Amino acid sequence: MSSKVSLSPYQAETQLGAIWVMSHVHERRFDREDVRLLSTLAVFAGAALTLVDERDSGIESDRRHSEFIAMLGHELRNPMAPIDSAIGAAKRLCADNETAVEVLTVAQRQVRHLRTLVDDLLDAARLKHGKLAIKHSDTSLNEITFDAVTTVKHHFKSRRHTLKLNGLDAPIPVRADHVRLSQVIGNVLSNAAKYTPVGGTIEMTVDVDAGEGSSLPYGQVIIKVKDNGIGIDSAVQPHVFELFAQSARAHARAEGGLGIGLAVAKRMVELHEGTISLQSEGAGTGTVVTLRLPILRTASVPAQPEQTTETLALGPVRLLLVDDNQDALLSLGILLELEGHIVTTVNNGRDAIRLMAEMRPEVAIVDVGMPDVDGFDVARAVRSDRNLHNITLVALTGYAAESDKSRALAAGFDYHLTKPLSLEKLQYILINRIDGKLGGLV
């Protein structure tokens, strides 16, 4: 004689499975208390299964979200590229028309602002999944600061701010990620400019702490950015470095941003083993942001000399542009011809491979996302031909992740550039290709 009970884990709307029990002892039959205990067990089992399901759904949702952000960045960069090139070409074509150049400069500035927003979105996705990384090199804090100020100087000009830089009279050699640290300083300066009224003052001071009596081998750099802007309420200050966090002051201005920059800056500083903090006495009292970075190195370790477009003359270069986007091909081709180069364009990978062998360009700039024969196929075909080994291959893509750069280099590209193409970075490549391939430095 046996007794059995079959229970649903949830008696309500969702059935996830069943708990089935049996007794083989004739004298023992299930009573109401047994049913109550088993029902409770079923509820707990169902709850556990639901939590696991929700967790898995959350992981899948995060994955889809990250993929969407990456695709969004790629799709936004595609139209930005021909717009940026067309504006650059138009500025050169109407160089004698001061009003037209001024209007086009505004458009160019806004395209670059849009690119910054796209980069911030991608950085947010990398930050959320722990994929932000840095590459240390021997460099100079003076040069890092110069690059940062150059990037954001339009903010100061448009609002007639006074920018004061202190402590940079002497060289400060550091071991840091030049690009990322420049991004951090630029972000802090940009935030100060956004929330400082027209005609205000922003002051950046750099102090070198030699580290005597400290555990730091060479001491640290202390960077303070002080503004006389609208300040931050004390209740908001603990949250300003959180991803997508925005204070009430951001809603009062159209330039509030995405609430990403400071969160990324904090992570970049931490990857340099430093700290970043913010202090404000409240509304209307201004803000002070302090960075402490143990990145000093001895001056006896020479930094690698950088050749710049100002110090080296560059003659015409034979270029081949490969892109299936006709607008991008036309606008970039015209811009590079105006720069003095000899440019040939082609809109598909198959013809690109043929033209490589026929015209032997010095540099080929290839969009990797073409149909049929894509840019990776082009690179592999060129690298398999010994006669074409001297061609410098530059991958042009809307993707900027380290994995995308690695894939491009593995296919045979020498460099990886993201859209819209930076003429400064291309100029650097054209100058340095003579001294050897730099392995995707830019």
Image (cartoon, grey):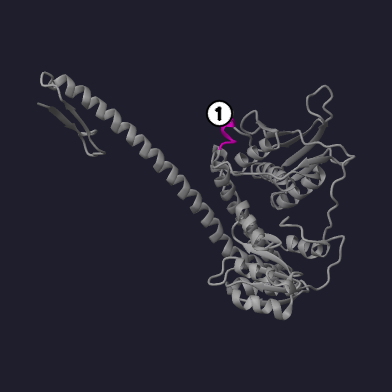
Quarter holding residue 283: top right
> From which residue to which does the magenta span run?
235-242
- At horizontal 57% and vertical 66% (from top left) the residue drawn is 369
Query: Quick one: quadrant of the C terminus?
Result: bottom right
Total label count?
1
Front in this rendered view, residue 25 or 43: 25
Q: Position of residue 35 (x, y in %)?
A: 17, 24
Question: Which one is in front, 228 or 175?
Answer: 175
Around disc 1, counting alpha carbons within 10 Å, would you say few (fewer than 14), some (14 to 19), or many (20 or more)? few
Q: Position of residue 114 (x, y in %)?
A: 60, 56
Amino acid residing under circle 1: Ala
**Is 321 placed above or below 47 here?**
below
Q: Position of residue 411 (x, y in %)?
A: 64, 62
Query: Where is residue 34 shown, x and y percent of the image?
Result: 18, 21
* Res 270 quadrant in image: top right
What quarter of the picture does the N terminus occupy?
top left
Left or right, residue 308 beside residue 373: right
| Residue at disc 1, secondary structure | loop
- Does 240 appear in magenta? yes
Name above or below for residue 390 compared with residue 410: below
Left or right, 239 with reference to 382: left
Residue at the spot of label 1: 235
Magenta span has 32?
no
Observer able to see residue 100: no
- Give me the residue at 84% from left, 29% from top: 210
Dominant secondary structure of the magenta stretch? loop
Instruction: Say which quarter of the image contains residue 234.
Output: top right
Does the rendering let one see residue 84? Answer: yes
Say if 396 sits above or below 61 in the image.
below
